[in-house]
C-alpha cells in the first residue's frame, strides 16, 4: 500500500493549457524547446529576460502550471521541473485568412496562424535527457547602460 502511494506521489503532475494563441507554432516552439526539461525557476528566469516576443505567453502558462501544482495537487512549488511542453497548430485549417491587396486589383491571403500550448510540471526531473535542437536558442535582452562621460583637460578649460 505504501509503495502505491509513493508511486502516485512520484507521478503527480500538474497541467496547464493555453489555447488559440494568436502566434505561429514555429515561433512558440523555439521558446518551448529552450526550456524543455529545465527546472521551473531556471525556465522562468530565462523566459523573463528572453528577447523573444513568444516568451511572454509561455511564461504566463508556466506560472499557471506552477499555481495548479500548488493549489490542486499540494506539490512543493519550489522544486518543480518542466516535464513536458508541447506546441500544436490551431484549428480551421490551422490558420485564419486575411486578405492582402496586391497590384492590379489582385488579392493574396495572409495566413494568421493559431497555436495550442500544453505545459506539464512535476516534482521529478524528466526521465529522458532533453534533445538538443538547432533552433532552441533564446537570446537574452541586452540592457543598455550609459557610460559616464570622461572629462579631458581640453574640454574643461
Image (cartoon, helix red, strand yellow):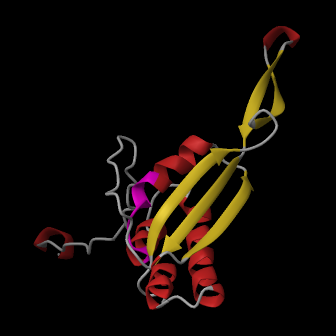
- In the displayed structure image, the side of residue 90 where residue 122 appears, left or right: left
Q: Identify whether 3 is placed above or below 95.
A: below
Q: Residue at x 53, y 60 (%)?
A: 55
What is the quadrant of residue 68 in the picture? bottom right
For the question of whether residue 105 can be seen, the reply is: yes
- In the displayed structure image, the side of residue 146 where residue 98 appears, left or right: right
Q: Which residues are magenta?
A: 33-40
Q: Residue at x 42, y 73 (%)?
A: 45
What is the quadrant of residue 70 in the picture? bottom right
Q: x and y percent of residue 47 in the render?
A: 47, 66
Residue reaching furthest to the front: 1
In front of the other: 26 or 87: 87
Q: Residue at x 75, y 29 (%)?
A: 110
- Quadrant in which the C terminus appears: bottom left
Q: Identify whether 64 is placed above or below 88.
A: below
In front of the other: 133 or 71: 71
Q: Residue at x 66, y 86 (%)?
A: 72
Q: Is residue 35 magenta?
A: yes
Q: Is residue 94 magenta?
A: no
Q: x and y percent of residue 60 in the render?
A: 61, 71
Q: Identify whether 62 is placed above or below 115.
A: below
Amino acid at each position: 500500500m505504501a509503495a502505491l502511494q509513493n508511486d502516485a506521489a512520484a507521478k503527480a503532475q500538474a497541467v496547464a493549457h493555453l489555447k488559440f494563441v494568436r502566434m505561429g507554432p514555429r515561433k512558440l516552439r523555439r521558446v518551448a524547446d529552450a526550456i524543455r526539461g529545465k527546472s521551473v525557476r531556471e525556465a522562468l528566469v530565462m523566459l523573463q529576460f528572453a528577447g523573444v516576443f513568444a516568451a511572454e505567453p509561455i511564461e504566463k502558462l508556466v506560472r499557471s502550471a506552477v499555481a495548479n501544482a500548488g493549489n490542486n495537487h499540494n506539490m512543493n512549488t519550489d522544486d518543480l521541473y518542466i516535464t513536458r511542453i508541447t506546441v500544436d497548430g490551431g484549428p480551421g485549417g490551422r490558420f485564419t485568412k486575411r486578405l492582402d491587396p496586391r497590384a492590379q486589383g489582385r488579392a493574396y491571403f495572409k495566413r494568421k496562424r493559431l497555436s495550442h500550448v500544453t505545459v506539464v510540471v512535476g516534482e521529478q526531473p524528466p526521465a529522458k535527457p532533453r534533445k538538443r535542437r538547432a533552433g532552441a536558442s533564446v537570446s537574452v535582452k541586452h540592457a543598455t547602460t550609459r557610460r559616464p562621460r570622461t572629462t579631458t583637460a581640453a574640454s574643461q578649460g
